[in-house]
Image (cartoon, rainbow, N blue to C red):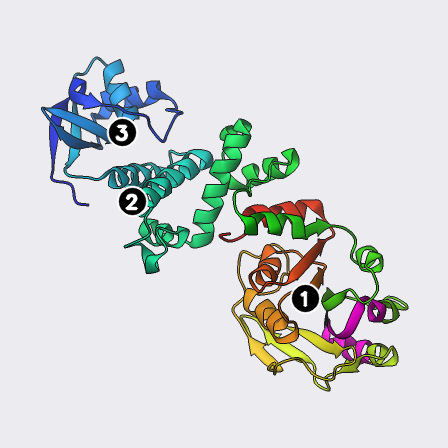
Amino acid sequence: MKYKDTKEVNIDSIIIEERQRHDLGDIDTLALSIDTFTQLDPITIQDVGNGKYRLLGGERRIRALQKLGRTRVIARLYEDLSKVEQYRVELELDVRRKSLTPVEEARAIRRIYEEEKKNYEHKLPGRFGRGFTQGDLAIMLDRSQPQISRALKIAEAADINPALELCTTHREILKKIVDDGTVPIRGSMVAKQLEESFIVDEMYAYIESLSRNYCDLLIIDIDKVKPHMFEMLFTKIRAGGTLFVFHPNILVSNVTSLALKEGFFAETNTYICHNSKEDTYITYSWFGKNREHPLRHMPFHSSHMRNNEVLHSKAKAYTLMQMLVKYNTEAGGNVVIAPCFDIESIKVCIESKRNVVGVCPNRILRDKALIQGSEL
């Protein structure tokens, strides 16, 4: 999308449609600057024929010039832009000038997404025949997919709660969403399953409330071992089921001896998953009830790059959870993750046709995870 040239046009010939930006800020100060230094930056317009132009960027400069009684404006001219390209130019200009609030930017991104989805509503020739996706939009706008997903959810949340429009930062929006209880995850079966499967409770209290022989797979994370813990866990796992315990490396022998004492089978080696650095790792142990090995072989050493946007230090990597779930359960099995701080772990289970409950001990962390989660 290259502009044709820069020219001076009559302000009256410019059509100003509904804009992504609604708060124009301090026009008087801008007018004084233009009066002192002249117009330093061209506005951006599109030629629509018959001597008329559509404004793409620069409404504040036009309003400031009108305040000064000027009738002409210097403009950068584009031709032959599609509707989506118009929105993209407007978004890029506003973002570059940092003139959009987070909600305005989110709605601008959603407008582009909705227009492109219309273009591919019959799916072909969309990406891999699936129509236009959030991943496609991320590539188009040179953003990450989580950023696109977050923007769409912010736009939806702002529709529910207009007070979010007053927020000036993403952090402020997130806090207000959590405080007001506005969790904008709607519209898909997977999204509803995620919300229903991600509960708030204390880890041990929830596990104690489970019926006997309920879990095919129970994944827990402990910093210290509570008395009689493994005695309780043994009753909650059905015959042939699996227990995974994430624990500090120093607890390996303690955890293993207690599990063996209660009747679990144990792997002789501890599993180690390295993060971004070789000396940064997490350890976990496998225990089976009436089963001596996982359903399929799992490597004792694995590695992954840790997601920089995880919400809690104990959130498990998506690929690691895939391995634990798929190698130790069958479709239709019951999985409990406690404590759980991310929706990715739950999503793995849902995608794999497992029944899952993720137990988060903190409502704020749970709501943050739902809001900031990846594309549903």
Kindly check if marks 2 and 3 are in contact, taking CB atoms under 8 A apart as contact. Answer: no
- Range covered by the magenta-colored residues: 233-256
- Give the mark nearer the N terminus: 1 vs 3: 3
Viewer-closest of 102 and 277: 102
Q: Mark 2, residues whose alpha carbon is within 10 Å: few (<14), some, or many (≥20)?
A: some
Q: Quick one: which residue is furthest to the left in this view?
A: 50
* Alpha carbon distance from label 1 to label 3: 57 Å
Check residue 333 in the rendering and tell me which mark sits there, or answer none.
Answer: 1
57 above or below 279? above
> Total number of numbered labels?
3
The amino acid pointed to by label 2 is Asn
Give the quadrant of the N terminus: top left
Q: Mark 1, residues whose alpha carbon is within 10 Å: few (<14), some, or many (≥20)?
A: some
Tell me where residue 60 appears, x and y as whole percent: 30, 25
The amino acid pointed to by label 1 is Gly
The amino acid pointed to by label 3 is Gly
Q: Mark 3, residues whose alpha carbon is within 10 Å: few (<14), some, or many (≥20)?
A: some
Residue 45 appearing in the image: yes
Q: Which residue is mark 2?
A: 119
- Relative to residue 229, is residue 297 drawn left or right? left
Name the secondary structure under disc 3: loop
* Alpha carbon distance from label 2 to label 3: 28 Å
- Give the mark nearer the N terminus: 2 vs 3: 3
Residue 167 appearing in the image: no
Q: Is residue 293 magenta?
A: no
Q: Quick one: which residue is furthest to the right in this view?
A: 227
Q: Which residue is mark 3?
A: 58
